[in-house]
Every structure is written in structure tokens, then in C-alpha cells.
Amino acid sequence: MKRRLLTGLALLAIISGSFITQASAVVQDEEFRSVDSMTVSEYETQIESKASNITYIEFQVEVPGESAPQTFGALGQNLTLDTAIEGAKISIEDILQAASTEDSVSKKRDSARYSLINKKLLAKDLKISSVEGKSKSKLWNTTKKMGRKEKIQTASPNSLVSDQAVTTAAAVACGTWRPNFHANIAANSTYQGQRYDQLKFAFTQGQLDQFACTGSTGFEPDLVTDNYDGLHYFGDSIIYYTSTLPYSYLDTNFGDGVDERVYTVGTYNVSALEPWLEYANYIRVGNGNTNTDRAKVVWQRNSTLFLGCFAVFGPAWCSNPDDSRKEYVWDFPLPGSFQVQ
Amino acid sequence: MKPKSWKLFWLTISLSVAFVVILVGTLLIYAAGKRGANYKCQTFAKGGDSFHVELNIPNPSWRCVIIHSTGVSTEVRIPLY
């Protein structure tokens, strides 16, 4: 009887032990998202050394003479800062390749700008702005509180209730807010098996003034590709992106359909946009299932869903679309260059 | 300072937390629905058109308002997701 009891207890201990081990394994692989601005050494000691799998790294490089830094973002599995920097170098090679199809002024400007950024990448002179992945231990206590607070205008929850009236009134009262399209260039990446797209645009002072008029705080230039036939030049998800937009973020594809694929890097602070400055969004994606396709652009202005939403859910999930404008429907050849002089 | 009634204290805390959770949840459901409706709305618009979606309260649906480059506007009703 005693022996049976002991055997039963031992079995129970083994079963519960295996459950506890499994449970702790789940705890060990806890997901984390850090939106702290940190130096490379802070990142290496506080994040990289403790994380078991990093799936997203975003960092920023300051460019002398420019008010906004250039943002680089890498997505994948088991990322390291070195692989993210390598990705940035490939992106720069692609951007310079794209610039070779443009006029000599753009070519010269891009060449000077990106050779400076390349030097900074080599010296790891950059700030890590966002990291996501899985970690063995909680990382929240080891990092500083997020630094995205400057100049952000957020809508109060009350403004959401009257959103309908505001949107309609703004659309009537305010003028053209969409930027001027400059160019869209798509081609095979210098990294084999991948493809890129670069979208360029600029605002006039008058267009920027309209953002203030409408009350919108965010802006998203959506590159939309045709997938009605199930054939797509770009693969499913973005592998790498870089943007010269201030306060930039990679938008989520949540809620998007399958007929038209959307690739977006937006900004959540339009007050930091400058007039007559050409902004460029670059995305790099895996190969799709066709070698030719077409695309269009949809400009979208947004407001914040509710106060404090960014801090919890991030800008991609908190951008409330106020108004959009569709242009150059299926005019962009993929691959190819489409430019407006 | 101790609360006079712990029951009332915890009830207040629970109701406040529930209120915030419901409020934030509702806003996120609204955002997700509007995002999907906005995507659908853009497929109806043509080049040069501007568009936006509004919540149509009396008849639960999204109202897709398309303002054509000519200045004429049309509306498309999109069901709630």
C-alpha cells in the first residue's frame, strides 16, 4: 500500500515536473518589444546578450545638415545588429543603383549623402530606436523609458467622437495636403533573390499647412501593387526598409485585402516634415511569383486613435485614417522607373 | 488611509479597470474595422479621387465617401467587419 502510494506520488511528481518545465520554457521565450532609444553598447549589453531570438531591429543614423535622421529597419529571424547593418549597406547599394536612373543632380546628392551614412554604419555611429523578439528574461526593467514624446500632437478621445464631422468639414474647408509625387523605382536588389522599391515625394509649404488645417498628425504613402490576377512582383513581407521621413514607422498589413498588396512606411508626426525636401521610402522584399507587375500610390493622412495609444500599441496600430488620395493608378511598372519632372 | 469598506474599494477598482478595458477594446475594434473599410474604399476610388470612411451609426455600416477629381462625390456603403 505504502509502495503504491509512493509510486503514485513519484508519477505525479514527474508529470507535474514536466508541466512546470514546459511552463518555464514558455516563460523563457517571452516576447518583448522595446521602443527605447539606446546606444549600440546599451543595446548589446541589455538586449542582444539576453534575447533568444530578435525578429525586428530599427535604428537611426543622423545626417549632418538634416533635421531628421534616416531610419533603417530589418525584419527576420535571429537578427543581430551586424546583420541589420549589413542590410542597410545592401539597401544603400540599391538606392545608389536606383539613383543612376535619375538626373545628375540627384545622383550626386545621393552619392554624397549615402557615402556619409556608410561611414557612420562602419563606425556603428547610430541609435537603436526599436527592437522586437523573444527573450529568456524580462527586459523592461533594464531599459530606459521610451523616448518618442517630442512634438507629437495627439487627438483626445473626445475628438474621435466627432471624427465624422471633423473629417467632412476638413475635406471641404482645407486645401490639397497630398505631396507631389517625384518617382517610383523598382528593380532586382543587389542582394540576390530580393527586390526593392523606392518611392520619392516632396511637400510644398502650402501642402504642409493643410495638415495643420485638417488636424491630422500622421501621413502614410501607401505603395499598392496589383494582385487581382494572383501574380505579384514582390513577395509576402518586407525584409528591410529605410526612410528619410522623420518619426517613421513600418505600417502593419492588418486589415488589408489580398487583391491589392500594400507596402507602407509612414510618419506619425507631420509637424516635423519640411517643405521642398525630397523624402524617400525604400522597401526590400523577397521575389514574388511573377517578373512583371504594376503599382499605384495612395497618400493617407491620419490622426492618433486615442491619447497614449502609441506608447502601448505603437504608431502602426494607432493611426486612424482621416482622408486618402489615390494617384497614378497602375502607372508604376514593376520593375521599372516612373518619374514626374 | 484605509478605505472604509474593502468590498466597495475592490468593486470600484474592478469597475474602473473593466471600463478602461472595454473603452480601449472598443476603440481598437473601431480602428481595425475602419482600417479594413478604408482599404475596401480605396478599391472603389479612381486616380485623382480622394476618399475617406465614416461610421454610419443609424444603419450600422461604414460609409465610403469618394470625392472625384471633378468635385462630385459619391458614397458606397461597406458592411461592418
Image: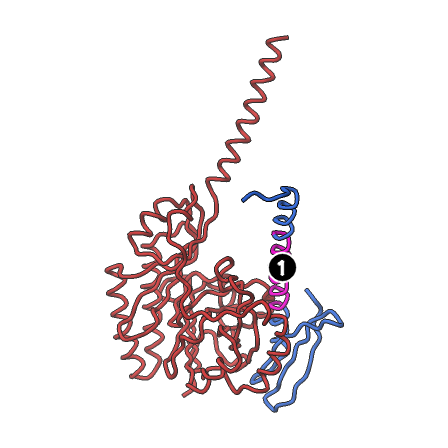
The residue to which callout 1 is attached is B23
Chain coloured blue in the rendered structure = B
Residue occupying the point 27% across, 62% down: A121
Is B26 contained in the magenta span?
yes
Q: Secondary structure at mark 1?
A: helix
Tell me if mark 1 has few (under 14), some (14-19) or many (20+) residues whose alpha carbon lies within 10 angstroms of its own: few
In the image, residue A26 sits, relative to residue A284, either above or below, namely above
Q: Which residues are magenta?
A: B17-36
> Number of labelled discs?
1
Closer to the camera, A54 or A215?
Answer: A215
Residue occupying the point 69% across, 78% down: B76
Q: Position of residue A245 (x, y in %)?
A: 40, 72
Closer to the camera, A27 or A53?
Answer: A27
Q: Colour of chain A?
A: red
> What coloring was used for the rendering?
by chain
Q: Position of residue A311 (x, y in %)?
A: 48, 59
Residue occupying the point 46% across, 50% down: A32
